[in-house]
Amino acid sequence: MEKEQLEKLASIQHDIWAHWQKYLHSKLKYSEYEKDGKTYACYILDAGDYDHWEKQIDTPYSELSEKEKESDRDQVMKYLHLIK
């Protein structure tokens, strides 16, 4: 694989990761708590979202819903032209 193609794919992979992180962060709720006189910040994920993603992690692609498959296909379309 030539270096230019590798860099293009790596850039797309970063965009895919950043897209996921932006989505994930939009689902988190900010909270603070105190312990031993210090204030700590934490982000809390709704249990329903957590359970959904845990199930998705354990589900083979072939068993995903059509909507979930389409989301994966959309991500592949970002780089498919580079590997044809």
Image: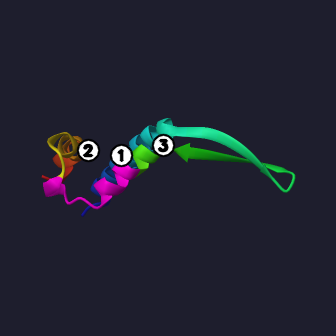
Any mark on residue 16, and which?
1
Q: CA distance from mark 3 to mark 1?
A: 23 Å
Left or right of 69, for residue 33:
right
Q: What are the residue bounds of the magenta stretch? A: 51-63
Residue 25 shows up from this direction: yes
Left or right of 21, for residue 31:
right
Q: Which residue is mark 2?
A: 75
* Numbered disc 1: secondary structure: helix
Q: CA distance from mark 2 to mark 1?
A: 7 Å
Sooner in the amino-acid sequence: mark 2 or mark 1: 1
* Numbered disc 3: secondary structure: loop
Mark 3 belongs to which amino acid? Answer: Asp
Q: Is residue 32 magenta?
A: no
Picture quarter containing residue 15?
Answer: top left
Mark 1 belongs to which amino acid? Answer: Ile
Q: Residues within 10 Å of mark 2 (few under 14, many from 20)?
A: some
